[in-house]
């Protein structure tokens, strides 16, 4: 249970434990719980939607939902999106790209990626006519499943780093356990959730393969990149499914 609290405190603003110093082993063991943190964030987003839906202001509601996720998640993964974008799209060598990603300063690609993320997420949610609950649960949950796959199935690009603890000490059954947690919402949301899960898995595999080709492996920053891109992708796919009559909701 301590590993669950460590991961919860690291990936969200929910601080149940007073401890601020954790062992690397606890970080690693928390990996299998990542989709559960996605449930918590998704439930918070659903609550915002439930409270604001009567106002009939879809784009404002969508914007507050996106801000709510960024607030509850603490912005850790969003920071990874920006750092990764600066490095991956820099057009530099592997070594230089990794240096850029390690730099705490935000570059033009990083800023642009965050602007695109917030706008696509907001416009996607705001353009939906039906209930948002399936995608509000799917996006943070399946995004974090892709994060688990990044950690467990791909090499780490650096000899050290915070993300290295996740990779080095994670359970050998982390992917299987995380997949179980990530797919549980399908029992309630049905086939559309399964469809989103399959699409997110394919996207995650592609993104990780592309990242490894660019910098020779994954990093803590690319974990955030994969998660955030997956979330926006799932929202846009849900728009296509619901508004494009691809699947009868």
Image (spheres, helix red, strand yellow):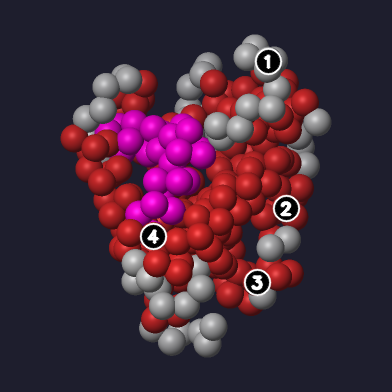
Q: Secondary structure at mark 3?
A: helix
Find disc 2 in the rendering and name its residue.
181
Predominant SS of the magenta segment:
helix
Q: CA distance from mark 4 to mark 1?
A: 35 Å
Task: List the residue tagged with mark 4.
Answer: 61
Toward the left, the furthest residue is: 108
Q: Whole-percent x and y of residue 207? A: 44, 50
Q: CA distance from mark 2 to mark 4?
A: 28 Å
Query: Any mark on residue 189, and which?
Result: 3
Give how far across and how far down residue 217 sits, in percent: 48, 34
Tell me whether the residue at label 3 lies in contact with that at label 2, contact meaning CB atoms closer than 8 angstroms.
Answer: no
Q: Which residue is mark 1?
A: 19
> Would you identify the image quadrant in which residue 172 lies?
top right
Q: Is residue 241 above or below residue 113?
A: below
Q: Residue at x 47, y 77 (%)?
A: 130
Observer-nearest of 85 and 132: 132
| Left or right: residue 192 compared with residue 175 | left
As drawn, the residue found furthest toward the top would be 21
Label 2 element class: helix
Name the residue: 33% across, 59% down: 60
Q: Is residue 81 magenta?
A: yes
Is 163 drawn above or below residue 19 in the view shown?
below
Identify the image quadrant of the N terminus: top right
Q: Nearer the viewer, mark 2 or mark 4?
A: 4
Nearest the eye: 204 or 159? 204
> What segment is highlighted magenta in the picture?
62-88
Q: Is residue 128 visible?
A: yes
Give whichever of discs 3 and 4 has the lower sequence position.
Answer: 4
Q: Residue at x 34, y 71 (%)?
A: 127
């Amino acid at each position: 249970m301590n590993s669950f609290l460590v991961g919860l405190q690291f990936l969200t603003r929910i601080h149940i434990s007073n401890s601020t110093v954790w062992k690397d082993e606890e970080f690693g063991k928390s990996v299998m719980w990542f989709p559960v943190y996605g449930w918590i964030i998704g439930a918070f987003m659903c609550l915002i939607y439930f409270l604001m839906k009567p106002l009939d202001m879809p784009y404002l509601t969508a914007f507050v939902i996106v801000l709510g996720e960024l607030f509850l998640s603490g912005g850790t993964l969003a920071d990874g999106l920006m750092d990764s974008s600066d490095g991956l799209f820099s057009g530099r060598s592997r070594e230089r790209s990794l240096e850029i990603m390690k730099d705490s300063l935000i570059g033009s690609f990083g800023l642009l990626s965050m602007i695109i993320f917030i706008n696509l997420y907001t416009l996607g949610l705001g353009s939906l006519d039906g209930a948002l609950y399936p995608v509000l649960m799917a996006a943070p949950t399946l995004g974090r499943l892709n994060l688990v796959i990044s950690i467990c199935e791909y090499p780490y690009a650096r000899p050290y780093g915070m993300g290295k603890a996740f990779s080095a000490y994670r359970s050998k059954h982390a992917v299987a356990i995380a997949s179980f947690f990530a797919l549980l919402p399908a029992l309630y949301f049905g086939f559309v959730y399964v469809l989103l899960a399959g699409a997110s898995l394919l996207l995650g595999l592609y993104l990780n393969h592309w990242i490894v080709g660019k910098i020779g492996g994954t990093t803590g920053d690319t974990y955030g990149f994969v998660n955030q891109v997956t979330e926006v992708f799932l929202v846009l796919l849900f728009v296509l499914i619901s508004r494009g009559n691809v699947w009868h909701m």
